[in-house]
Image: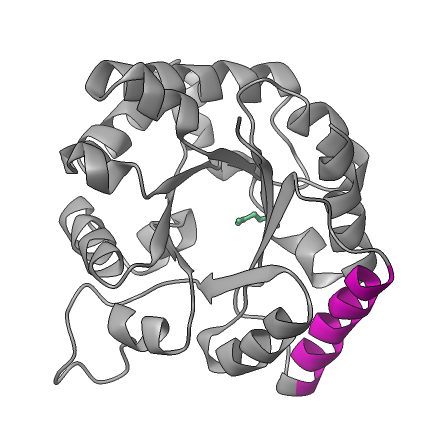
Amino acid sequence: MRKKIVAGNWKMNLSFTEAEDLLYEIVDQLANKPVEDNVDIIIFPPALYLELASDAALDANIYYGAQNCSEYDNGAYTGEISAQMLNSMDATHVLVGHSERRKYFNESNQSLYNKIDQALSYNIVPVYCIGEQLEDRELNRHFDVIKEQLSEVVFKLSEEEFSNIIIAYEPVWAIGTGKTASPEQAQEMHEYIRNLIEKNYTKDIADKTYILYGGSCKPSNAKELFSCKDVDGGLIGGASLKYSDFIELIRIAETV
Ligand code: PGA
């Protein structure tokens, strides 16, 4: 039986003190009312603040990770952060292939595969993000785009490797736009993804894979999204920067 996951992607936001305030507001709320066992919380702060997150994680039941990692092992790659470094900070998860990284940093399928490989070698769970552009949906090729993003990256993994990843479906037209996929659109795509996983691996693996929805998910629409059979929670951008919204999303996830 899958739990729900509520994950916060802070992107490139917040000063150190703002990040500290946000984390401790979340920790305080969870100290008053600990999160139920049926929900996992993951926070993806800017990597610079991982140590803050690790302190906070001790006080509450929170996993934390980075928004990106290098496709290379340690060495002469100025400015990069390796999966081994994340592991040494006790980070448990890393986002890979977020649409903003694909768009602004030209991340190729091969480099995404390498990043996932690095993460897995250091026992970090990659959260692999996929999603179609508005144009793809308008031209009715959204299923093909998703299939390609899976086939060219994560479907190259062995069964054992694949069992250690999380998928996040984030339609690009819904990210940061206030325009959310309807529950029907989300469920339809999540079911399609789960069926592809079953075809490529096994039903057991498909049933165990977490598929999160991302894209303008907020307290007002989370209940109907999280209630969808194949939606296992959310990857939350904007609403994860406001502690009250983030906590509300966690509480909603506990009830569905
Ligand atoms: P959003 O971002 O919730 O602000 O749309 C989601 C994401 O990019 O992960």
Classify residue 63 as left or right of residue 238.
left
Q: From where the camera sits, is residue 151 visible?
A: yes
Q: Give the total of numbered labels.
A: 0
Q: Is residue 47 above or below residue 168?
A: below
* Residue closer to the observer: 171 or 223: 223
The chief SS type of the magenta part is helix
Classify residue 151 as left or right of residue 100.
left
Q: x, y percentage for residue 98?
A: 40, 50
Q: Is residue 13 above or below residue 177?
A: below
Q: x, y percentage for residue 77?
A: 17, 81
Question: Residue, x 81% and y 69% (percent of image)?
Answer: 28
Question: Residue, x 30% and y 37% (percent of image)?
Answer: 163
Q: Is residue 92 above or below residue 248?
A: below
Q: x, y percentage for residue 121?
A: 20, 59
Image quadrant for the C terminus? top right
Q: From where the camera sits, is residue 141 visible?
A: no
The quarter of the picture where residue 24 lies is bottom right
In magenta stretch: residue 23: yes
* Residue closer to the observer: 41 or 32: 32
The way the protein has been coloured in the rendering is one colour
* Residue closer to the observer: 117 or 139: 117
Magenta range: 17-32
Question: Residue, x 67% and y 40% (percent of image)?
Answer: 217
Q: Is residue 40 above or below residue 182?
A: below
Q: x, y percentage for residue 192?
A: 40, 15
